[in-house]
């Protein structure tokens, strides 16, 4: 999750929690976002996030690694809130015939969450709308700044 916009950048889902799942999601997120050196990556202290390969990937990408205190869900409140929303708004009282059906449902919710779900912390727009507004404002600022530099 990008904390600026609350957008889910990359994820993996399976019936196990092996480090490779998180590592593949991390690599995809880095490839999609191409963050600048010094970006902050925050997680809890689960084994998949403390694995040598995961930490090495973060270091190679130039991340500042931040981890919450052990057993304190408030240290990762945004992700905890996302999972609570997923469960409460979408998965609660649903049953799925197959794992694939459950995976497709989670994928559907994440697309809905990114594209349509409003957040009070974002002035009641969706994560994608927040990113588009920022990009538009930033682009206008850059163009204006460049126009003043040329004259």
Image (cartoon, rainbow, N blue to C red):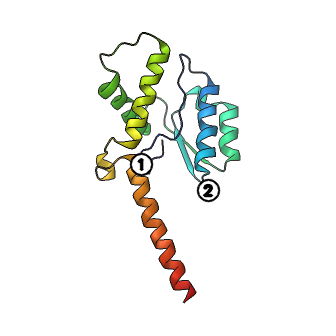
Please determine whether, in this image, residue 44 is positioned above or below residue 2.
above
Residue 36: quadrant of the picture: bottom right
> Which residue lies under the disc numbered 1?
128
Residue 41 point in image, percent of width and height: 55, 44
Residue at image point 68% right, 45% down? 59
Residue 20 point in image, percent of width and height: 64, 26
Please determine whether, in this image, residue 71 is positioned above or below residue 8.
above
Residue 137: quadrant of the picture: bottom left
Residue at image point 49% right, 31% down? 70
Please determine whether, in this image, residue 32 is positioned above or below residue 107.
below
Residue 101 point in image, percent of width and height: 45, 17
> Which residue lies under the disc numbered 2?
36
Q: Residues within 10 Å of mark 1 (few under 14, many from 20)?
A: some
Q: Earlier in the sequence, mark 2 or mark 1?
A: 2
From this viewpoint, is residue 74 visible?
A: no
Residue 131 point in image, percent of width and height: 43, 54
Residue found at the very far top of the displayed protein = 97
Q: For mark 2, give the secondary structure.
A: loop
Instruction: Tell how many labels.
Output: 2
Residue at image point 47% right, 66% down? 138
Q: For mark 1, give the secondary structure.
A: helix
From this viewpoint, is residue 101 visible?
A: yes
Which quarter of the rendering shows the C terminus?
bottom right
Please determine whether, in this image, residue 8 is positioned above or below residue 150.
above
* Disc number placed over residue 150 in the picture, else none: none
Compare residues 146 and 21 and report the one nearer the observer: 146
Residue at image point 51% right, 34% down? 44
């Amino acid at each position: 999750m990008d904390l600026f916009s609350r957008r889910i950048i990359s994820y993996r889902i399976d019936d196990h929690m092996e480090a490779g799942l998180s590592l593949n999601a991390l690599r995809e997120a880095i490839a999609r976002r191409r963050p600048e050196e010094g970006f902050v990556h925050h997680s809890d202290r689960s084994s998949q996030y403390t694995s040598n390969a995961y930490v090495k990937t973060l270091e190679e990408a130039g991340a500042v690694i931040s981890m919450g205190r052990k057993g304190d869900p408030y240290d990762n409140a945004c992700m905890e809130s996302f999972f609570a929303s997923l469960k409460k708004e979408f998965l609660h009282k649903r049953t799925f015939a197959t794992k694939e059906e459950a995976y497709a449902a989670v994928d559907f919710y994440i697309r809905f969450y990114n594209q349509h779900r409003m957040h009070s912390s974002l002035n009641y727009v969706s994560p994608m709308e927040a990113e588009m507004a920022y990009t538009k404002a930033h682009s206008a600022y850059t163009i204006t700044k460049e126009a003043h530099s040329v004259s």
